[in-house]
Amino acid sequence: MKNTLTLTITAMLLTTAVACSSSGTGTGKVHPSAPGATALQAAEGTTEITIWHGLGAANGKAFTKLIDQFNAANTGKIHVTAAYQGVYADLLAKYSAALRDGSAPTVMLAGDIATAYMIDVGRSIPASDMAAANPDDLHLDDLAPAARNYYSVDHVQQAVPMNVSTPMLWVNREVLRSAGLEGSRLKTLDDVVAAATTVKQKTGRTGFTMQTDDWYIEQLVATAGQDFCAPDNGRSGKRANSIIETYLTSPQAQEEFSHATGYIPINTKTADSPTQKAYLEANPNARAFANQLANTPVTTATSGCVSGAMTSIKASNISQLQAAFAGGKSVDDALATAANDAEKAFQQYQEQLGK
């Protein structure tokens, strides 16, 4: 079966409320309840909120700017301290340590594969609970359906997506013309492979390149309508301080963050903004990204694999992908090794949970 190149969406980051237990340390589940709108009214002085994130470079600067704007608008009521904790793997490792010593943040902005782990440790408040407790502030229905679905498990919205990425195929038409492929339509993976081979044969230039990140493999699997892990991407039978989440996912904040970083706005009402319409008109690439998100079907395949073992699985996938691309292994052997490593990672994770 040929796979079309309209690739699926995945949310790169998520925002989820992490409530710290005041009754001790350790990783035991405490299932904190969602605070409502009256929580701030009852508080004396300025409410301090800490948010850990994994956004570096330009993305981190754009995020910090939003936090600064939020603090300025809530002087004397709420103050948010944002702290960069390194790449997502480092962020989760620091969060795990923080659970043991009682220093967990109020809110955490983590990578797309953190959902299952956050559920398993039981120390965060589902976004659905936050929305129910704050119906006038957090409107989950305004979020893009595909992004919302990615962070829902057993019909419960576990986290609020902050920003999303979508893979895109970039084509150098001049290179195609030099290989006699002018006018070629690259609609399937077979088309891309054939064109890349011809470019290499006729021009000596590399016909195709991609980052060796298994994120792309996850997207290709979803594009084919297949689950990345079985059964049902881990979504059958497997088991957010509102104000800052509401602000970060608001149409205005999403528009500003999108323009500064290139990520796709996840609030559908951003599209109603005159300045956003003008931006998309002037930036066809951004328009293509937004359209791809809007056209992503909400299915099990596009919802991503829910497993706390994904960090280990991704590490093995990347290693095997690099081995295959370097010619050290056949693709079949690399996939077989990756599958075997994934099974071991699943088992080890279940043992750590005591299951």
Image (cartoon, rainbow, N blue to C red):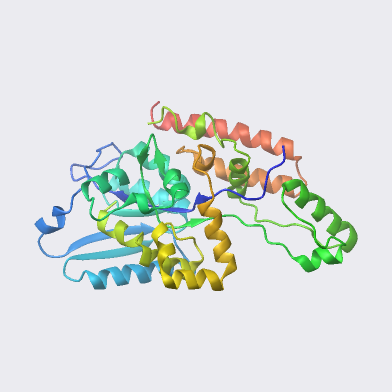
Left or right: 152 in relation to 44 = right
Q: On the rendered structure, is 186 left or right of 339?
A: right
Residue 341, placed above or below residue 205: above
Task: Tell me the quarter of the image containing the C terminus.
Answer: top left
**Left or right of 336, for residue 158:** left
Between 160 and 336, the residue placed more toward the observer is 160
Q: Residue at x 55, y 59 (%)?
A: 289
Quadrant of the image for the N terminus? Answer: top right
- At horizontal 58% and vertical 44% (from top left) the residue drawn is 218
Residue 282 occupies which quadrant of the picture?
Answer: bottom right
Q: Is residue 19 visible?
A: no
Residue 45 x %, y %? 12, 65
Residue under the image location 89 percent in, 57 percent down:
201
Above/below status of 216 relative to 255: above
Kindly tell me whether residue 71 is visible in this rendering: yes
Image coordinates of residue 276 in percent, x first then y, are 45, 69
Q: Is residue 244 left or right of residue 348?
A: left
Count of marks placed on residues: 0
The residue lying toward the viewer, choosing from 288 and 43, is: 288
Q: Decide which of 212, 254 is in the foreground and name it.
A: 254
Residue found at x 51% / y 34%: 233
Q: Write down the quadrant of residue 173 in the picture.
A: bottom right
Q: Determine the residue located farthest toward the right in the rendered image.
A: 202
- Residue 295 vertical position relative to residue 69 in the rendered view, above or below: above
- Image position, residue 84 (x, y; %): 39, 62
